[in-house]
Every structure is written in structure tokens, then in C-alpha cells.
Amino acid sequence: MKEFMLIFRANIQSEEDFAKFSPEAMQQELALWGVWMGSIAQQGKMISGHPLQSHGKVLRGTAKKLTDGPFMESKEIVGGYLLIKATDEHDALEMAKGCPSLRTDDGTVEVREIMPAVA
């Protein structure tokens, strides 16, 4: 099996955007994610995954210039990631298609194969 990272992006700018969700809507959203991630785990293909804060810091270049991140020019945030095992890219893409982020036109899931460590 190969390992893949699923990177979730959404057009949500801040924690204030999340605060606009009602408690009921947030519970429904979390339930959808739980069902989807649970199905991957039941197949024995889940490695790990976590949501990410919408803000962070970025160090750039040899000067190690510190800026607010992730990217000042971006309208999307990386909301989280999931590490999975899959037989190939097609298998990983099929799992990614069930992601709750894809229920809206602005949600994206980037699928990236993890390169094996070089000894």
C-alpha cells in the first residue's frame, strides 16, 4: 500500500466564519466528517488526520522573513488533512470523492502521494 495525504481547502477566512454556523449545523457537519472518516478507518486505510487553525505563520527564504500565513494572497484556507493508505492514486481519489468538503463548489481536496523515506 502507498500513503497519500488529502489536503482540505475551503473558502473560509477566519474563526469568525466558523462562528456563523449554528450549533446544529456544526453538529451535522461534524457527523458527516465522522461517517466519512469512519468508513476509511473501517477499511483499515486511515493513518491519521486533524483539522487546522485558519491562521499561522510563514517563514520565507534565507532571510527567514516572518509573515502571517498561510498565504496572504489566498482566499482559501487549508482546513485540515488526512493521511491514508491506498493501493494507488485511483484508490486514493475514490476515497477523496466522499469528502464532505466537496458538497460545495468552493471546497477542494488535494490528493498527494507521500514519497517513501530515503535511508
Image (cartoon, rainbow, N blue to C red):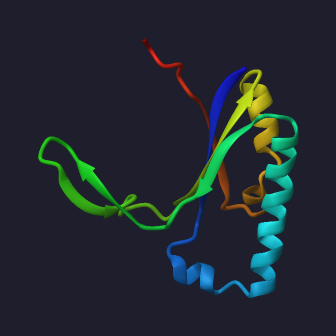
Left or right of residue 63: residue 33: right
Q: In this view, does 16 lie above or below 32?
A: below
Lateral position of residue 42 relative to residue 37, left or right: right
The residue sitting at 74% across, 22% down in the picture is 88
Q: Which residue lies furthest to the left in this view?
A: 63
Q: Which residue is drawn at 87% across and 46% down?
A: 39
- Left or right, 118 with respect to 41, comes to left
Number of numbered discs overlaid on the protein picture: 0
Looking at the rendering, in which quadrant would you find the C terminus? top left
Instruction: Name the residue at 71% across, 26% down.
Output: 89
Quarter-wise, where is residue 16 in the image?
A: bottom right
- Residue 8 visible within the image: no
The percent coordinates of residue 1 (x first, y second) are 73, 20
Residue at image position (23%, 48%) is 60
Residue 53 lies, in percent from the top left, at: 50, 66
Q: Does residue 14 show up? A: yes
Q: How far across and down, in percent of the image, does residue 100 sit?
A: 78, 58
Q: 110 or 27: nearer the eye?
A: 27
Reply above or below: 41 against 85.
below
**Side of 42 relative to 16 (left or right):** right
